[in-house]
Structure formats: structure tokens, C-alpha cells
Amino acid sequence: MSIKHFLELLLLSALWGASFIFMRIAAPEFGATNLAVLRIVIAAITLLPLLYFIGKPYLQDQDNKVGVLVQVTLVGIGNSVVPFLLFAYAAMNINAGLLSIINATTPLWGALFGMLILSNKLVRSGYLGLALGFAGIILLSEHKLTGEIDAELLSILAVLTATCLYGIATNYSKRFLVGVPPMFIASGTMAGSALVMLPVLFLSDAPLTGISQDAWLAVIVLGMVSTGFAYILFYRLIDNVGPIKAMMVTYLIPIFGVLFGYAFLAEQIYLNMLFGGTLILLGVLLTSGLINKRL
């Protein structure tokens, strides 16, 4: 990986790490539903030129245009609509650092559903990685497992469900969107998600009045930069360095998420976050095979 691509990887990690800060700022004022809808719509508008210049010529050459659009929209629902709703809900109850750490479980779910959907095989270290990763999840939430079910525990479960859906959507797209340009998948899934979610915004009882400037700024930057532009950067990295190296962003996001939460929101860093996060990252490295490749 060249220095240029490594810097792009760091930038993407910082943008996605910052997304948890923006959600924490905006979620209490907008509510989970409005925040998720606005994030998707703003990101879709940001990616609209990409959809036009890449999607239009691609679809013109396709005999089954409707089928492709349906599959892209289904991936968008699993990769954006439901996860963004779940993350927005969780952002009202748990801090940005913890959100970013749990988000790092995405490759674990990707490997698990890769076995179930694509019949991928894991080596022994891969199974050990899955076990360590899920042990890290338990460590992160152990203080809630023996108590009553409250908003914090439900939020942890919401984030895990979101990352689980990321894993399903990734493998679903690998199976049913073979040959579709990655940039079209990025812009098309967001456009399809926006069409699905726009009616929800108009039917919502939650008002968009009385929102502070900070919250509006947070949701705009979240949609345009940490979602729209970040998607472009991610798929650009996939094209230039391959999916395995591009997925290294997952290992760096918690670093930025925790540091940004500490620096900008005065969030505390707890030992179970450090130990649990370390187990998750170690599990991800084993499951993805990166440790074995370096040995």
C-alpha cells in the first residue's frame, strides 16, 4: 500500500470515527428516526452525481434493469436503512467510543455469514478469532448482563444487530451483485434507501423545529462527509488496494472514535472498553487472516 493510499485509509478511518460524535450530538435533538432519515437523504443527494454518471450508462447495458435496482435497494435496506436507525437509537444512550468499538465487530459477522451464505471456509485461527471477538463483546457489556434490561443494554444489542446486518448485506451483495460497479452499489444503495425512508420523514410526528445549529451542522456533516464522501473514499480504496486492505479501516475506526469522544465530548475511557476492544480487534485480525498472513 502506497503512502497516498495509507493516508486515504487514515482519512476514512477518521471520518467514520467522527460519525459517532456527530450522531451523539444530533440524536438527542432529532430523535433516532429523523436522524437516520436525514443522514440517508443527505448522503443520497451527495452521491447523486456519482449515481448519474456511473449508474446511467451501466443500467443502459442491462437487460434486467428492474432486477438490478431491486437487489441494490435490498442491500441498501440491510446496509443503511435499518443499521442507521439502530445506530441513531443507540447514540442516544451510549457514548461514541463504545459505539465505535462495537462497530468493529462487523468483519466477525461478515466471516460468519460468509460461511452461511457463500459457503466460505475458515481455518482454525478464524474460529478462534470469532470466539475472541464475541468474548470481547461480552466483556464490553458484562456490567449489564446481570442487571435489568435498560436503554444502555438495548443500545448495545441494537449496535450488534446493525453490525450483523452489515455482515449479511456484504455477503448478499457479493452473491447477487456480482459484476455491478462498486461506485454504483455505493450510490444506488443510498438512493434506494432514501426513497424508502423519505415517506417516514413526512409521516413522522417528531418536529424538525427548535433544533440547535450544532445539531443541524452535525447531521449535515454526518450525511455529506462521514457517509456520502466516506462511501466514495471507501470504494475508491477497494478499487485501488483491494477489499482486504480496505477493510483495515475497521481496525482503525475505534481508535478515532474513542479519541474523538474523549477530546470533544469529554467521554470517559473504561478498562472494560480497552480490554474488550482489544479482544474484538484481535478476533477480527485472526478471522480475516491478517495475522496468519504476517506470520
Image (cartoon, rainbow, N blue to C red):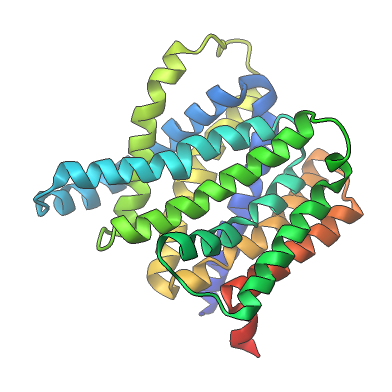
Residue 42 image point, x, y percent: 44, 33
Instruction: Say above or below: 209 vs 235.
Output: above
Q: Is residue 281 visible?
A: no
Q: Measuring 39% from the left and 42% from the top, which residue is drawn there?
A: 76
Q: Measuring 58% from the left and 56% from the top, which residue is drawn there?
A: 106
Closer-to-camera residue (69/207): 69
Residue 5 image point, x, y percent: 50, 72
Q: Is residue 150 left or right of residue 21?
A: right
Q: Is residue 128 left or right of residue 40?
A: right
Instruction: Say above or below: 73 vs 280.
Output: above
Closer-to-camera residue (6/186): 186
Q: In the image as oriented, which residue stretches furthest toward the bottom? A: 295
Q: Is residue 103 left or right of residue 164?
A: right
Q: Is residue 169 left or right of residue 181?
A: right
Q: Quadrant of residue 23?
A: top right
Q: Measuring 61% from the left and 21% from the top, which residue is drawn there?
A: 30
Residue 150 image point, x, y percent: 79, 29
Q: Measuring 44% from the left and 51% from the top, which residue is drawn there?
A: 169
Instruction: Say above or below: 168 vs 267.
Output: below
Count the marks.
0
Which corner quadrant holds the C terminus? bottom right
Residue 232 image point, x, y percent: 42, 54
Closer-to-camera residue (89/190): 89
Q: Is residue 268 visible?
A: yes
